[in-house]
Image (tube, rainbow, N blue to C red):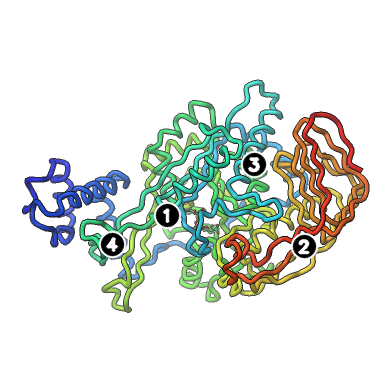
Amino acid sequence: QKNLRILTQDQIDLAKMLLHEGQSHLFANWAEQGVDDEKKTCFFNQVSRLNANYPGGLAAYIQKARQLLADSKAGKNPFEGFTPSVPSGEVLTFGDDNFIMFEEVGVKEARKAAFVLVAGGLGERLGYNGIKVALPSETTTGTCFLQNYIACILALQEASCKLLEDKYPVEIPFVIMTSDDTHTPTLKLLESNSFFGMKPGQVKLLKQEKVACLDDNDARIALDPNDKYMIQTKPHGHGDVHSLLYNSGLLNIWHDAGLRWVLFFQDTNGLLFKAIPASLGVSATKGYHVNSLAVPRKAKEAIGGITKLTHADGRTMVINVEYNQLDPLLRTTGHSDGDSNCETGYSPFPGNINQLILELGPYIEELNRTHGAIAEFVNPKYKDSSKASFKSSTRLECMMQDYPKTLPPTARVGFTVMDAWLAYAPVKNNPEDAAKVPKGNPYHSATSGEMAIYRANSLILRKAGVQIADPTTAVFNGQEVEVWPRITWKPKWALIFSDVKKKVNKGCSVSQRSTLVINGENIYFEGLSLDGALLINAVSEAEVQVTGSVENKGWAFKPIDYKDYSLPEENRIRGFVIEKLEQLEKNYSEPGQFSLQ
Ligand code: UGB
């Protein structure tokens, strides 16, 4: 009332809505009219943003929160009435005929795809100071995750158009969801690297907004402890990507342009694009509206489990059950061991790697109905067992993989299981937490993420007939890892297994201590024997035949202490640096045919 005269009609409406929703405490300590008036305007600007950014507005957010907080306090089981069982999906084996067939279908389909990277998370578990997409995926070439993703999309675009002999090349749209924490550095990273070769108009950044924090079970909105005119906010989760896409208008533009698929992926999986062509092929062949990528999962691993849920009333759905919910769900439904490994040494529930392929038409239909709203949850940290108050404020959260929860039973929801060595090596855990991971479970650290890239490339070449030496083991940052030859290639050299097979002939061998960097498109190997470091840089118009024997001191891993703050953080979190002792580096910058012997 004291401030009524300085408020606009919109602000009065927002204030009325807040009062109606039990939020009078927000105004309790406001100064008299004439004092702090600018701050009051800022307050309403923030309320207006929070109101506009939530489907149904802030009133809907508060009401939903009250309901979910009451359910949480009552200890209500979110899976009430559902029984979990192991679902069946498409299980692929790298390199067999089926896999090769799906890869070829996938590459053809790629020209009808749009890619969406969710990169709004700060990566609290990793504790890295920068944005995660700027981290090198491996330090042999220093290629950062974002650069790798863009190179893969561009290579897919080119390969897809070539396969169909398309005279009108397409530009695969690429969307990045950012947040206040990641937006500016992501844009800077792109701009300072000329968008890593992608046309700037091909990339769209959509920024997710945070949501209001809540102080108690009545969903009273939390104020910033240092500013009584500022509402505390926290991230709402990766599920925001659906409402952002819906509101952006991009989905209809894509649909009108003839696109058929939207592929969602996460910020730090250096292997992901090795799995994309085959899984897109599965989506197209099986006609899946939703296809989740999965890998065999170790019990207790911090990735969700793909689970079939059957309700007492007969309803069924195949959905991700998040890692912290799987164990309690199993225990309350008669599996006294909870989340545990079966005789295969893995959990029977495939692990969700949060790579989703959605068919665009049905996706648009569903979002027209839901406006992109995703099932939410709340996870308050209570002070004590009375659950009367929280240790710190909480908020509603949502996850992108919960999209299928609102789909009708007729929706075709499937999943594709790939070998973990091929598809999944995220960088999520800091060195200390990674070192505590139970033996045999993946570390999900910068160390393991890098080593996984060398292992995958080595195994792929082995499968193509190259003699690759066995790995050794080493310990970096307290984590024991396999060290394979450091082999890297650009996606335009080989996107799918048949590309690899065309470019390497039998009779090649690579020793364990070797480094091989293939930085070019038309580089062919026949009878190469490598024991050391070989780097080949070639423009696409140069065709290079590589034969003979290369031997030199090569590049070696030098362990470092992650607490040695004189070293760059990118290296410290891996626990090693690469010492470049000696290498053979060849550059082919002109068109023509060349031979490296
Ligand atoms: N992200 C956002 O873009 N915005 C946000 O508000 C939050 C995150 P995390 P999480 O693959 O190992 C997921 O934190 O959420 C982005 C799945 O839920 O890395 O703990 C963020 O930038 C889980 O089922 O993972 O767990 C990042 O790119 C399992 O699949 C992505 O969202 C697990 O990932 C994931 O955020 C996994």
Frontmost of labels 4 and 2 is 2
* Disc 2 versus disc 3: nearer the observer: 2
**Taking 190 as reference, is 161 above or below it?**
above
Q: Residue at x 61, y 36 (%)?
A: 197
Which residue lies most toward the top here? Answer: 167
**In this view, the mark in front (1 or 2):** 2
Describe the element under mark 2 as helix, strand or loop: strand
Q: Which residue is identified by label 4? A: 214
Residue at left 32%, top 78%? 384
Mark 1, secondary structure of its residue: loop
> Which of the image's four quarters has the C terminus?
top right
Decide which of tag 1 and tag 2 comes sooner along the chain: 1
Cβ–Cβ under 8 Å for marks 2 and 3 = no
Q: Please give left or right for residue 566 compared with residue 406 in the image.
A: right
Q: Quadrant of residue 160?
A: top right
Front-most of residues 511 and 389: 511
CB within 8 Å, label 3 to label 1: no
**What is the x, y in percent for residue 308?**
52, 57
Task: Look at the numbered disc 4 and give the secondary structure of its residue.
Answer: loop
Q: Residues within 10 Å of mark 4 (few under 14, many from 20)?
A: many
Q: Secondary structure at mark 3?
A: helix
Image x and y of residue 52, in percent? 29, 44
For residue 345, what is the image quadrant? Answer: bottom right
Circle 1: is it few (<14), some (14-19), or many (20+) Cα within 10 Å? many
Q: Decide which of tag 3 and tag 1 comes sooner along the chain.
A: 3
